[in-house]
Amino acid sequence: MNEMIENLLSHRSIRKFKSKKLNEQQIEMIISSAQHASTSSYMMAYSIIGVTDENKKAELAEITGQSYVKDNGHFLIFCADLNRVTVKANEEEYEAMLDNLENSEHFLVSAIDAALAAQNAAVAAESIGLGICYIGSVRNNIAKVDELLDLPKHVIPLFGMAIGYPAHHPEPKPRLPIDAVYFENSYKHHEEALDRFDDRIAKYYEKRSENNRTDTWTDQMKRRFQNTIRMEVTDHVQNKGFNKK
Amino acid sequence: MNEMIENLLSHRSIRKFKSKKLNEQQIEMIISSAQHASTSSYMMAYSIIGVTDENKKAELAEITGQSYVKDNGHFLIFCADLNRVTVKANEEEYEAMLDNLENSEHFLVSAIDAALAAQNAAVAAESIGLGICYIGSVRNNIAKVDELLDLPKHVIPLFGMAIGYPAHHPEPKPRLPIDAVYFENSYKHHEEALDRFDDRIAKYYEKRSENNRTDTWTDQMKRRFQNTIRMEVTDHVQNKGFNKK
């Protein structure tokens, strides 16, 4: 196993950072790594906003309920961006592009492009000793975050990423057994693998150093999905011209 | 710059592979790397199908129109999977989960989770000298691919990934200038950066060794978006219980 793969396998989210900021060279290297990820048909359908304004960071920390959105070495927000491909279109051309801009296919394309770029950014940051945490809770109030970043039509915020020098060393969190995730040639139902994982997770939650509790993965997921969250993402996304048809 | 980042920056898609197959250890290492990517609220909302059946590979090559879907060292299909979280739910619990299973929020979550995992797989594969190419064209006939893989409700195919030993050495494709992608604190309009990129791309297409032509990035995108593609992704996704509300 090489060092690259060791890095990937030892990932854990960092939620406490030292106050030291990233320098410009580090930020450029992380963004450049993001840009070199694969992209669907060369669309590069994403934008990245680096948030340095302390007031904006404080507001984002409040929306997300996560203090490390404010207290970190740098904070990025990854956006789906289908605006860029329209910039040079005249009115007639733009009208002819709308069916694609607004369909679920290109909603998927832009979300996937943004995520591929983001994961390259994460890997690059971790390779130089930094820690990261993805922040899906920017979607707690997606309209407010969108406004805060002045995003035009056909651009929406998807998730944030806090980056910085780790100030704690959490244990990596167990992953599903491979036979619950990877199947050959066709989908396999995998209740038995989930049972095995639930046993393992029950022990993990019982024994871990912080926030120990009695729980299993399947129970946690059942609870989570029974409380509706972020139902207003749908409307916001459509208002911005995504995922309408 | 370390080796990891050099690897990220030198990525290019590989579309010609030697006939040598990946061994089991390589495949496990790639899948394990995928699994260790970040995941939204521990949902791990994806599955990966490794396609080895030659008939299925031939069918997928026909659907995608890409011969290297058949001729490679290994072929993966990444799926959004919200089925797994329902497996242990009784009927009443399942009913209570439906609003979340079917909303755009969790459509996004599952697509993003799958993409983060996939990019880790790509990085892992490239770190051991393999090449990869993402295959979005599995969505050319998403219903057929779904059927071919026996995907249950709440699981859909998103994209494929051909992996293998490179049999050609294409030049890396230029990326947008950083000031067209990365902005501080708020979205910046960036026409001038696109003009610069169009100039660069015109020269790239004129000079590159294969398929040289006269084109710019913005023209290419305008053409692409004026021909509707994959409009039936919307219906298929909704039929499988995603993105309905």
Image: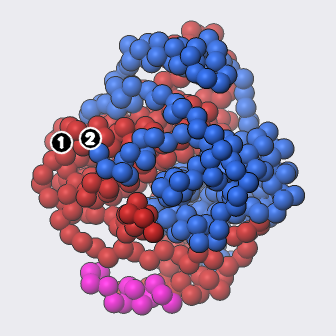
Chain colours: A red, B blue
Measuring 46% from the left and 84% from the top, which residue is drawn there?
A: A201
Measuring 33% from the left and 36% from the top, which residue is drawn there?
A: A49
Q: Nearer the viewer, residue B165 or B37?
A: B165
Q: Position of residue A36 (x, y in %)?
A: 45, 39
Magenta stretch encompasses residue B38:
no
Circles 1 and 2, Cβ within 8 Å, touching? The answer is yes
Whether residue B177 is visible here, answered yes or no, is yes
Query: In the rendered image of this protein, does residue B239 appear above or below residue A239?
Result: below
Relative horizontal placement of residue B197, taking residue A31 as reference (left or right): right
Tell which subunit mark 1 falls on.
A
Relative horizontal placement of residue A242, taking residue A148 as reference (left or right): right
Residue that carries the numbered disc 1 in the rendered image: A23
Magenta stretch encompasses residue A205:
yes
Whether residue A140 is visible here, answered yes or no, is no
Q: Nearer the viewer, residue B71 or B97?
A: B71
Give the magenta part as a residue range: A199-211
Q: Amino acid at mark 2?
A: Ile
Q: Position of residue A162 (x, y in %)?
A: 29, 52
Tell which subunit mark 2 falls on.
A
Q: Amino acid at mark 1?
A: Asn
Q: Position of residue B19 (x, y in %)?
A: 73, 54
Measuring 64% from the left and 71% from the top, which residue is drawn there?
A: B24
Disc on res. A27:
2
Q: Position of residue B10 (x, y in %)?
A: 45, 41
- Total count of labels: 2
